[in-house]
Structures are given as structure tokens and as C-alpha cells.
Amino acid sequence: MAGSASDPTSGEDGSDRHKGERLQKVLARVGVGSRRTCEDLIAAGRITVDGVVAILGRRVDPETALIEVDGAPIGVRPGLVHYLLNKPTGVVTTADDPQGRPTVVGLVPDEPRVFPVGRLDADTEGLLLLTNDGELTHRLTHPSYGVEKEYVAEVQGVPTRAVLRRLREGIDLEDGPTAPARVALLDASLVRLTIHEGRNRQVRRMCEAVGHPVLRLVRTRIGPIADRSLAPGAWRPLTGDEIRALGVAVATDPGVSPQN
Ligand code: URA
């Protein structure tokens, strides 16, 4: 029973490790694995809380603790901000535009200063993260972490199954072949492409190469982050769970990720 003297998790020394939620519950909620898997990870010494290897029975305040899985943070550190913006067309993904066009940074609060995570073309719409978390930015944009980005493209013409297969298998672009992608036809000229590279104008160039130039392009998901209710031009802070889920998506070594 919580709080009873017989419960090893409810010690009376007043330390934080006896307060808050059970660690395995927090880990499971953000997608590290089932509760059982998370208990095994804790028992194996793969989880640290504020730099200290956690033991089974540990409780945490998920809003303040720095929780790491194999060295990859899933916690939210103080001072860091993370915004999700629904970028409208005509807005450029830079902090400062010499041509004076509106920028994504101008759509979110000035302080603390944040930077876009990767980029969307001026004529692309949809989800864009902005943050002052340099490590997360690096991991989300570096191809070796393989974070998925999902786009919905309205294209010219109606792609055949053979065209969809070519998009899926990889297209030879001038900067090399594209990696295999997930591709689905949602409607006659509406294609959903899920890629994990971030090459310049990649989706547009892929569609152009198969004879179906993009008429409209919207990014609908970044790893675990999606939001269909955010209006164009609107932003919101990521929730603690979303930030932790991103941390899991960019775990140190994808080969030993607890999700695999
Ligand atoms: N692919 C593109 O072609 N443009 C974007 O903005 C993002 C991905």
C-alpha cells in the first residue's frame, strides 16, 4: 500500500526517489516498452535518473527528472523549450531572411531563442519543431538516427502502382539514390510518403523524377509527433510525454534501442 512502512518504495527519508510516479510506468507511457520490459531495463541497469542508475521501485517526477535510457535522455531538462508549429506556405525556415520574408522563428515566442529542427521549403506546409535543445536537434536531423518524417503530397496526375513501387524502392536523384520509403496512395492524386532522410527538397524531387510534380506538400508527422488540430500558423509547446517520446525515438544506438 502506498505510504505504508512495508512498501519499499515509500521510504520515510524524504528523498525524491520515494515520490512521484513509478519509473517503469513513466517509461512505458512514452513508448520505451511494456511495463514488464521497462522493469527488465531498470533491473539491467540501463536506466538512469539524474545520472544515477535506477533501481526497481524508483519513483520519479517526470516533469523534472532527467531520465535516460542507454544514455539517451527521455526527460525534460529545465530551461529547454520545444514548440510544434504548423508552418504555413510563404514562411521561410530560417531565423533571419535577407529578403525580409516572414520566418518560422517570427511565429513563436522570442525568448528563449529557438531554432528550427531541419527545414521545410517555403512552399511546404505542416509540422515543424523549434527548440533551444541543440542535442535533440542534432539527433532529429542526423540521418543515422533515422527519425521518420511523414508527408502528404498532392501531385499532378494519378500515380500508377508501378510508380508507387519506384518511390518505395528508391529513386536515383542527382545526389544519390533515396533510401526505401513507405508510400501509400490516399486518393487519386494524394500520396503519403514516409521517409527518414532529410535531403533538400527530397519529396518534391522524388515525385518530379517519376513524372508527378508536387502541387501541394504537407508534413504530417515527425517521428512520434503528429497533430491534426493545429491551425496553419499556430504553434503549441510539446507536452512532457511528447518530448520524452522524441527522446526515445533518438535513443543513442538504434541497434540496441529498447523498442527493438
Ligand atoms: N521534401 C521536400 O521536397 N520539401 C520539404 O519541404 C520537405 C521534404
Image (cartoon, rainbow, N blue to C red):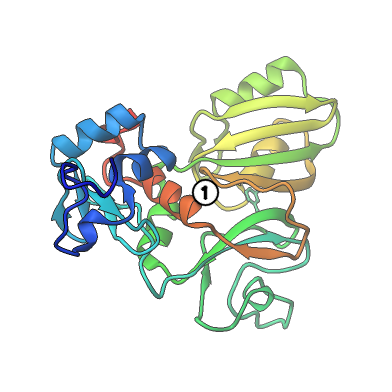
**Mark 1: few, some, or many residues within 10 Å (few <14, many ≥20)?**
some
- Position of 206 relative to 73 (above/below): above
Kindly identify which residue carries mark 1: 198
The quarter of the displayed image where residue 130 is located: bottom right
For the residue with label 1, is its CB less than 8 Å from the closest atom of ligand 1? yes
Indicate left or right for 92 with 45 as reference: right
SS state under label 1: loop
The quarter of the displayed image where residue 87 is located: bottom right
Foreground: 172 or 10?
Answer: 10
Q: Where is the C terminus found, in terms of image quarters? A: top left
Residue at 70%, 30% in the rendered image: 210
Q: Where residue 194 sits: x, y (%)? A: 59, 35
Foreground: 239 or 130?
Answer: 239
The quarter of the displayed image where residue 172 is located: top right
Q: Where is the N terminus found, in terms of image quarters? A: top left
Question: The disc labelled 1 sits on which kind of residue?
Answer: Gly
Foreground: 228 or 62?
Answer: 62
Residue at 38%, 67% in the rendered image: 134
Indicate left or right for 68 with 92 as reference: left
